[in-house]
Image (spheres, rainbow, N blue to C red):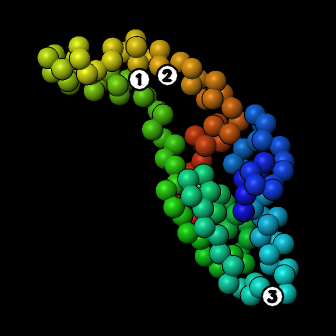
Amino acid sequence: MDDRQDGVSTGDVSRVVTTADFSKDVETSFAWLKAQKKIDAGRIGLMGHSEGAMIAPIVASRNKDIAFIISLAGPAASFMKGIVSEYRAYLSATPDSMRPNYILSPEKFEALLAPQTATLLLDWWKFLLRYKASDYY
């Protein structure tokens, strides 16, 4: 299926939409597909890539009629925890001879991250960071 506002799909993709909202989109599509007379409703599965790999188990956990899921390249949200301290540890382990030419100072590294902080405040990102796959398997 298309993402909201891709292809022929419509829908809100504002700053308040989360992965949970997208899972409801998939549930709607699943219900429609299951109701089609030419479809074997007992053999419908979900395949998701990236964020879709998170959505498939969410939807399957609420719809026991889903026969299978295929998860491709699901995101790992925990990488954000302590990223600056990890960078500092990496920097301290780097030989002095390599630092000036190849490694950013912690200040430059943090400055590069600063423009990304607005993204971290989105409801979508907060959901992503709290997502635990084990809640849906």
Q: Residue at x 56, y 58 (%)?
A: 49
Q: CA distance from mark 1 to mark 2?
A: 9 Å
Label 3 packing within 10 angstroms: few (<14), some (14-19), many (20+): few
Q: Residue at x 64, y 24 (%)?
A: 118
Label located before the other in sequence (1 or 2): 1
On screen, residue 97 above or below 5: above
Instruction: Describe the element under mark 3 as helix, strand or loop.
Output: loop
Which mark is on residue 38?
A: 3
Comparing marks 1 and 3, which lies closer to the viewer?
3
Image quadrant in which you'd find residue 47: bottom right
**Image position of 34 with respect to 25: above or below:** below
| Spot occupied by residue 5 in the image (x, y as percentages of width and height) | 78, 48
The residue identified by callout 2 is 113
Label 1 sits on what residue type?
Val
Report which quarter residue 108 is drawn in: top left
Residue designated by label 1 = 84
